[in-house]
Amino acid sequence: MINIELMQDLSEIVQYERSGIPLYVRTADLNVYPDMSAPCHWHEDLEWIHILEGRMCYDVNGRHLILEKQDSLMVNARQMHYGYSLKRQDCRFLCILFHPSLFCSNQALMQKYVTPVLKNCALEYLHIPFSHVHGPEAAGFLMQIAALREDAAEGYELEIIALMQTLWSRLWKYEELEPGPDDQETDADLKIQKDMVSFLYQHYREKITLDEIAASGNVSRSKCCRIFKRYLQQSPVDFLNAYRLKVSCHLLDTTDSSITDIALACGFHHLSYFSRCFCDSLGCTPREYRERKVRFSDYS
C-alpha cells in the first residue's frame, strides 16, 4: 500500500531514492493506493506520468483529464494534482518526479529555458497523447528512463538527467513549452483552495461544518462551494468524506482496530453512516473490504 505523506500546506514529502539527488522513478498500480486514489497534493518537482496499462483519471487544479494507454502527462511545479481510478478499474503507470534544479547549474540556461516555464501560470500541465505528433517520442524517452532506473547501473542518474534534458529541449523546440511573463501571479482562488483542503486534512477526525471550511479560506459558504466545484469537481463535504474513506481503507489494511474505532478515528461519528458511505464509494462494506484483503494476502 502506497501512502503519500503531506505537510500541513499539502506539499508532498517526496521520498527520493538517494539523499541529495531529487529524483524519483517508480512503476506502480493504482490498486496499491488507498481507494485507488492519491490525495490532492503539490510539490516543487515536475511530475511525469506515463500510462503503461489501463486508463487513469487525473486532475490538475480542477481540470479533469482521462489518460489512455501510452499517454504521457507533465504536471508543472507547484500545481495541485492527483490521479485516481476510472470506474474502479486498475491502471499501471510510470511516475517520475524530477526537480528543476537537476536540469543544469548554469543560471543563464536556467533563466532562459526552465524558469520561464515554471513561472507560466497558464501552463499547469502538458498532456501528450500517444496519438499526438510528438507522443511516441515523449513515451520513448520516459520508457528509457524507467529502464535505466530498473537496471540501476552505476551512474544511471546521470543518464536519466541527460534524457530529461533532451526531452525538455525537444518540447521547447516544438513550442510545446510556453514561457510565461515574470509578473504573473498565482490564481488567488487556488491559494484559497489549498488553504481549505489543508484545513480538512488536518481536522478530518473532528466534526467539521461548512462554515468552518469556508472560514479556513476566509470566504463565504457559497464561494467555498464554488471553489471546490471548480478545482475538485466535488462539494466540500463530499471531498471530506472521500478523504476520510481513504484513511479508513489504510487503517483497515494496516491495523486490527475494530470497524467502530476506525470510523470514529476517521471522523465518522455514526457507524451506519460510515458503512453507507463506504459501500456507496467502494461497493462493499468495511468488513467485506477487510476480509477480501485478508483472503488476497493468504494466496499471495
Image (cartoon, rainbow, N blue to C red):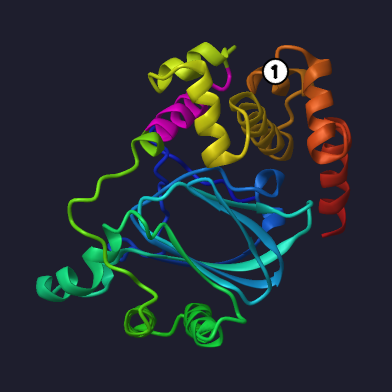
Q: In the rendered structure, does residue 199 fall within the stretch colored magenta?
A: yes
Quarter occupied by residue 177: bottom left
Q: Could you say which is closer to the camera, residue 283 or residue 65? A: 65
Vertical placement of 130 versus 186: above or below? below
Q: Position of residue 66 (x, y in %)?
A: 65, 61
**Magenta residues (range):** 192-205
Residue 78 lies, in percent from the top left, at 36, 50
Q: Amino acid at mark 1?
A: Phe
* Left or right: where 31 falls relative to 5: right
Residue topped by disc 1: 268
Apparent side of residue 149 relative to residue 114 in the rendered image (left or right): right
Q: How many marks on residues?
A: 1
Q: Main secondary structure of the magenta part?
A: helix
Q: What residue is drawn where x is 33% and y is 54%?
A: 121
Image quarter for residue 256? top right
Which is more toward the observer, 291 or 111?
111
- Residue 151 position (above or below residue 194): below
Q: In the image, what residue occupies the spot 32% across and 85% down?
A: 173
Residue 203 in sight in this render: no
- Depth check: 65 or 99 in front? 65
